[in-house]
Amino acid sequence: MSQATPAILELKQVGKVYQSRGSLLGGRGREVVALKELSISLNRGEIFGLVGESGSGKTTCGRLIVGLERPDSGDILLEGESIIGLKGGAWRRYRRKVQMIFQDPYQSLNPQLTILDSVIEPLVTNRIGRPEERPALVLEALKAAGLSPPEEFAPRFPHQLSGGQRQRVAIARAMVQKPSLVVADEPTSMLDASYSAQIFEILLEMREQRGTGILFITHSLAAARYLCDRIGVIYRGRLMELGPAGEVIGNPGHPYTQALLDATPKFGSTGEIPRYGTLLAVPRPGEPPRQGCPFFPRCRLGREDLCAAGFPEWSSLSPGHQVACHRWKEIAAAA
Amino acid sequence: MALLTVKDLSIGYQTPRGLLKAVEKVNFSLEAGQSLGLVGESGCGKTTIGMALMGLLPENGRVSGGSILLEGRDLVTTPEDEMRKIRWSQVAMIFQAAMNALNPVQRVCDQMAEAILVHRPEVGRREAMERVAELFDLVDLDRARMRDYPHQYSGGMKQRAIIAMALANQPRLIIADEPTTALDVVVQDQILEEIKRLQGKLNLGIIFISHDISIVEQMCHFIGVMYAGQLVESGTAREVFERPMHPYTQALIDSFPTLTGDKRLNPIPGEPPDLVGEIPGCRFCDRCPKPESSCRLEPPAWQEITPTHHVLCDHCEDY
């Protein structure tokens, strides 16, 4: 289909609902809306940051893109082709093009396999390259992931490596298949700051040298600002703000983005970062409104008549910078 | 007299490969109402120091030198039956990932009451429960939630409960080891504010252990930067972060993303040294951007930059 668009990945009005089962002691099962009407597009060679708290749906979004789960509504397109309903060989080809790096470096590697075997496994399973070529591909991937000299790391087992090194093996395993898109779900939140920086560097090189698109899922605005071209802010399954990273951080249009900024430590920041004070100290009592804005119960600027009544439309603050907030004009004017 | 004085503290672990020198000749002191941030990578010894302050080193860990003076009393030479009275009543700890430390099959109020009664059995259950209610107020937990079980609490609420338990017997010193790991940034901010508020109200001394320099900068009056078991720089938060002198401190700051920065981050290459066996010279020289020839052979000396700002380096330059 569309070769003209630079978007390699598009999510169109994607929805995902989980049914939680009833508990043994009699509580009834509940429907949990993990994602609702989520629309995002990722351009070729772009690093896109999906920022939100736990429970925001950001991990669910990553899992849907990678194919670990299927959406309940909406469409997901890779390079213009829908992945919904793909089966067999076509599905396997899709799964190769989109790889994931998980948060926990201590759980993502099989402790009984050497590093070489862990990284060669996807090549074998997906029949990539000729058998005699594969070890060289593994060494190349390990080197690209910063594990040098790769021959020293290949025969080791995961327990012999640090968390940061294990995460790099996970990256090598993702990269050895030469994917078009990598979903990195909080890849550094379990690592020390100094190792995080190493991982960021590898991700940047991945994009610079191979043009790989990266969906970077995080709760850290500082990391998102550093790595990402664009940022999408997600709250309770809904996208609230979207725009260039510098814009979203420097000129946030949504009260929730502002609340995240207020809560982020300002270490090393130059200049004044204003305090927005948009989070209510005590949330409004009762369930969040079914039809309205999910942030209303915690939002200082929330108005029952507007915000509880319906989800806001998307408005443009500036080219490429959009926000979903009923009171966006007043917020922008006050800035 | 300072609340806490740690002098030339060295701690080692017996491992199958030999003695692992986890902490080497660390010195610092703390007054009531002040907080010290111990910052460094995993394995630098900061948690080991925290455990030693609580007298909770594991079986194979031992203080091999120095002293820990809590209000003048040396905890290193204090026998265990005495330590049991001091632990949780004079010094308390908030452990890493403490949210999993709550007993899942016991109501939160009962766990807190137990923490009080264990130290002061004469108090009696009724008074202990009154104290629990006061503790709930103290940490901004709703009294109506007292009889809940831990799984009914959110992550932030569990952390407040852990903090309340640490404060149950009115300790003078709190050791907070990564108290906000696994918490979202909004909840983290609330918990940190809470800790600050409680410190002011109760005049607590706090040792804040973290690898996250943005948090310790926000929370602490003084900073101790640790690397491979040694304190490599110490000073006020302002001194250490605005004028870092040790190459490791500088490298740490350079590898941290900020909300406004545009520079490319410089990750510190390599890994910390193996702490089993002798390291004759500076422990950082393999990863140091500007090592001199003498660094590998001779251990660096503790230099004074200002009366409060010190650095373990013979060749340091301004940032």
Image: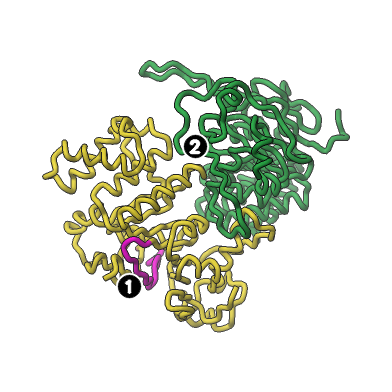
Chain colours: A green, B yellow
Q: Assign the N terminus of chain A to one quadrant of the image.
A: top right
User: Dot 2: within a 10 Å radius of its alpha carbon, few (fewer than 14), some, or many (20 or more) residues?
Assistant: some
Res B59 seen here: no
Mark 2 belongs to chain? A
Q: Assign the C terminus of chain A to one quadrant of the image.
A: top right
Secondary structure beneath label 2? loop
Q: CA distance from mark 2 to mark 1?
A: 46 Å
Secondary structure beneath label 1? strand
Mark 2 vs mark 1, foreground winner is 2
Mark 1 belongs to chain? B
Residue B220 or residue A308, whichever sits in front: A308
Segment colored magenta: B14-34
User: Dot 1: within a 10 Å radius of its alpha carbon, few (fewer than 14), some, or many (20 or more) residues?
Assistant: some
* Count of labels in the image: 2
Principal secondary structure, stretch drawn in magenta: strand
Residue type, numbered disc 2:
Leu
Residue placed at 47% from the left, 71% from the top?
B233
- Residue A13 figure quarter: top right
Q: Please provide percent x and percent y for residue B231.
A: 44, 70
Q: Please provide percent x and percent y for residue A319.
A: 78, 40
Residue located beneath label 2 in the image: A280
Residue type, numbered disc 1:
Lys
Identify the disc placed on residue B7: 1
Residue A207 sits above or below residue A322 on the image? below
- Residue A128 figure quarter: top right
Res B165 seen here: yes
